[in-house]
Image: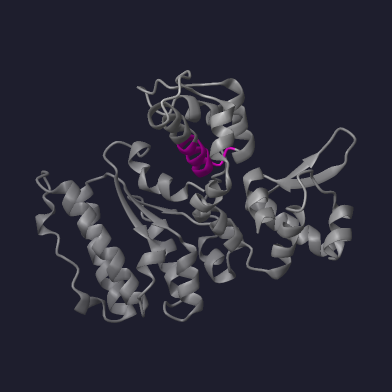
C-alpha cells in the first residue's frame, strides 16, 4: 500500500540535483514481445525525463538522440543501444544521480515466466545498478527474497528491502486532523479513534472514511440545513461506514482479495471473517478443516502481506485477526 505514491514522489526525498524517472512495469510489459521492446520503453522514459529536466542547462539535452525502435530490434542490439544511451545520460548529469523507479516489478517476473522477456534481464538490471550514478528502486508486493531464484540470484547482497506498511496511530491521527497546513475542520476525539480502529491505519481507507464523513457533514449543513457544530463527530463516521462505503472502496478490498491466489488462502480469510474476535490456531483447525502445519504456512503469508495481525497476550496465547477490520466486514458481507 502506498508504494506507487512513494515512487511518484521520490523527488521530495531525493538528494538535491537528482533526476527521478518513473516507469510502471505493469503497463510497460503489457504489450512487449521481447527484451528489446522493454529496453526501448525504458529508454523512452529516460529520454523524455532528461529532456524535460535538462533542456536549457549548461549541458543541454538537445544532443541526446531519441531512441530509434529499429535499433532495439533484438536483445543484443537493444542492450548495446541502452548502454550507449545511459552512458550519454551519465555525462549530461555530470556527477548527479539518476533514480529509476520501477513500479509493479512483479510484472517483469510474469513477463519472463510467459517467455516474452528473457531471464537475462535480471542480470542486466543488476549490472546497471552497480553504476555509481544510477539508483534502481523497485516497487512491488514481494521482496526480492520472495521472488523466483532467477530474480533473486543476480541481486543477491546488492539491495536493501524497505517495508511499506500501515500508518502508526500517531501518524494516522495527524493525517486525519491536519492533512494540510490550512486545514481548519475539527474532529471529536472518539471520531478519530474510530477511523483509526476501523482502518488499522491503512492510508487509502483513512482518506476514504474521512472524505465520506465530511460529505455527510456537508450534507447536514448545506443540503438539509441542520443547525449543528461544524465538526466531524462519531455519528458522521458511522454514517460513512455504510454498505455503499464498501462499494466505493472496492479497489482496495478487491486488491487485497486478489493476493489470495491459493484456494486455501481464501478459505483461511473467509474463516477468520466469520467473527470479530481473534482466532487461535486450534479454532482455525476446527472450523477450516485444514491441518495445523498448512494453516501456519498460510498465516505467515497473510502476516507478510499485512492482511492478518498476529497477537500474543500476557498468558502467551497466540491469536490472529484482520489488521484492517473493514476488510473483515467486507469479506463477511460477501
- Taking the image as drawn, is residue 76 in sight? yes
Q: Residue at x 24, y 66 (%)?
A: 84
Q: Is residue 308 above or below residue 196?
A: below
Tell me the colour scheme of the image: one colour
Residue 52 vs residue 170, the one in the foreground: 170
Q: Is residue 63 above or below residue 308?
A: below
Tell whether 24 sits left or right of 96. right
Q: Residue at x 43, y 78 (%)?
A: 118
> Which residues are the magenta region?
201-212
Dominant SS of magenta comes to: helix
Tell whether 224 sits left or right of 194. left
- Taking the image as drawn, is residue 142 in sight? no
Residue 31 painted magenta: no
Residue 163 vs residue 171, the one in the foreground: 171
Image position, residue 148 (x, y; %): 58, 69
Residue 300 vs residue 262, the one in the foreground: 262
Residue 114 vs residue 317, the one in the foreground: 317
Q: Residue at x 21, y 59 (%)?
A: 47
Q: Is residue 77 above or below residue 330?
A: below
Residue 207 painted magenta: yes
Quadrant of the snapshot with the C terminus: bottom right
Q: Quadrant of residue 196?
A: top right
Image position, residue 241 (x, y; %): 57, 41
Q: Quadrant of residue 46?
A: bottom left
Image position, residue 101 (x, y; %): 38, 53
Image position, residue 253 (x, y; %): 56, 54
Q: Residue at x 62, y 31 (%)?
A: 194
Amino acid at each position: 500500500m502506498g508504494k506507487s505514491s512513494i515512487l511518484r514522489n521520490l523527488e521530495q526525498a531525493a538528494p538535491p540535483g537528482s533526476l527521478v524517472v518513473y516507469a510502471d512495469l505493469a503497463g510497460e510489459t503489457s504489450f512487449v514481445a521481447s527484451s528489446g521492446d522493454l529496453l526501448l520503453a525504458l529508454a523512452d522514459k529516460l529520454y523524455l525525463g532528461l529532456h524535460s529536466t535538462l533542456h536549457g542547462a549548461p549541458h543541454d539535452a538537445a544532443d541526446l538522440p531519441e531512441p530509434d525502435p529499429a535499433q532495439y530490434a533484438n536483445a543484443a542490439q537493444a542492450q548495446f543501444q541502452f548502454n550507449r544511451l545511459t552512458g550519454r545520460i551519465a555525462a549530461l548529469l555530470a556527477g548527479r544521480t539518476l533514480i529509476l523507479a520501477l513500479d509493479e516489478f512483479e510484472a517483469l517476473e510474469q513477463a519472463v515466466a510467459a517467455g516474452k522477456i528473457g531471464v537475462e534481464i535480471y542480470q542486466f538490471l543488476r549490472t546497471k545498478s552497480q553504476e555509481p550514478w544510477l539508483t534502481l528502486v523497485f516497487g512491488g508486493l514481494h521482496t526480492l527474497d520472495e521472488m523466483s531464484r532467477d530474480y533473486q540470484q543476480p541481486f543477491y547482497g546488492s539491495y536493501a528491502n524497505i517495508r511499506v506498511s500501515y500508518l502508526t496511530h500517531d501518524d494516522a491521527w495527524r493525517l486525519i486532523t491536519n492533512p494540510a497546513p490550512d486545514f481548519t475542520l475539527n474532529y471529536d476525539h472518539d471520531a478519530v479513534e474510530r477511523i483509526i480502529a476501523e482502518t488499522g491505519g491503512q492510508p487509502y481507507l483513512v482518506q476514504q472514511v474521512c472524505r465520506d464523513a465530511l460529505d455527510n457533514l456537508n450534507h447536514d449543513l448545506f443540503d438539509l440545513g441542520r443547525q449543528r457544530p461544524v465538526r466531524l463527530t462519531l455519528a458522521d463516521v458511522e454514517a460513512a461506514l455504510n454498505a455503499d462505503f464498501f462499494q466505493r472502496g472496492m479497489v482496495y478490498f478487491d486488491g487485497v482479495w486478489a493476493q489470495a491466489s491459493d484456494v486455501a488462502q481464501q478459505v483461511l480469510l473467509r474463516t477468520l471473517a466469520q467473527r470479530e474476535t481473534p482466532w487461535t490456531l486450534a479454532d482455525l483447525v476446527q472450523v477450516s478443516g485444514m491441518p495445523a502445519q498448512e494453516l501456519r504456512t498460510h498465516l505467515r503469508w497473510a502476516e507478510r502481506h499485512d492482511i492478518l495481525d498476529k497477537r500474543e497476550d500476557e498468558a502467551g496465547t497466540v491469536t490472529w485477526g484482520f489488521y484492517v477490520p473493514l476488510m473483515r466486514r467486507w469479506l463477511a458481507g460477501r
